[in-house]
Amino acid sequence: MAKPSATASALKPLQVSKVTQQGSLSVHVADQLEALITQGKVAVGDKLPTENSLCDSFGVSRTVIREAITHLKSLGLVETRRGVGTSVLRSSTVEARPAERINPTTVEDILHLLELRLTLEPAAAELAALRYDDEDRQRLEAQHAAFSKTYAAKSQAREEDYLFHFAIATATKNPFFQSFYKQWSQSVIPRAKLLSIDINPISSERYLERVQEEHTYILEAILSRDAQAARETMFQHLNRARNTYAQYREQ
């Protein structure tokens, strides 16, 4: 890995444009940052500006910046270290994928289910932010911690993923959201449909790292009672999954 350049510590202002309300804000931010990195305007080893600085540069919220950075991580362009910040890893993209290949019928099943989840779960996250109680908070934090622990142990964390989303459904206080998750059980998680022989451990680990970080942002939004951010982060989480699995149609 390249050493940080002399300009890395200076954190020079980026030449970017403020984004508008047209389309996904995080996509616009991610596209501009990706272009800066792939064109060499932000060198490998350099650190990106802080979240607050990026918020000022683009004129958006921290939620939008975090979603954009998560996307850059999924492309293998950057990494974030606690206490250090976000640094550029490489200048060309390497997509994080859950498997080498997926049966076409399975791909369609996954995409249909994600389409359904996209209509329900952003609303569930929004309601959870407005309605959760202390018991829900403890459950959400416990399930998120369980996912992080299991993922760190190099597991696919399918059950833990399911239980985190089920905890959100429970926090809505709407029994029909819970019924939906109980009916589908772990099969609601796309990775539950994948064959072990098709999973690439390295790429899958990066994919799960992205999932874990997205879960963190969803949890933070819910516990902050920021209903709009909870809805947006859940939508981005599921939509990014849909886009990832849609790529397997091209194989």
Image (cartoon, rainbow, N blue to C red):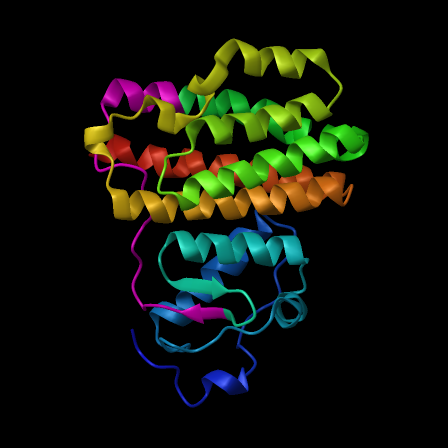
Q: Which residues are magenta?
A: 86-110
Residue 175 at x, y percent in the picture: 70, 12
The N terminus: image quadrant: bottom left
Q: Is residue 53 left or right of residue 185?
A: right
Q: Is residue 69 above or below residue 246?
A: below
Q: Is residue 132 visible?
A: no
Q: Is residue 29 left or right of residue 102?
A: right
Q: Is residue 170 above or below residue 31?
A: above
Q: Quadrant of the C terminus?
A: top left
Residue 93 visible in the shown view: yes
In which image quadrant can residue 60 be found?
bottom right
Q: Nearer the viewer, residue 37 or 204?
A: 204
At 43% from the left and 36% from the top, the residue drawn is 241
- Left or right, residue 177 beside residue 190: right
* In this view, 34 is above or below 240: below
- In the rendered structure, does residue 95 fall within the stretch colored magenta? yes
What residue is at 56 percent from the left and 74 percent from the top?
A: 49
Comparing 60 with 53, the one in front is: 53
From the viewer's side, name the closer residue of 213 and 235.
213
User: Total number of numbered labels?
Assistant: 0
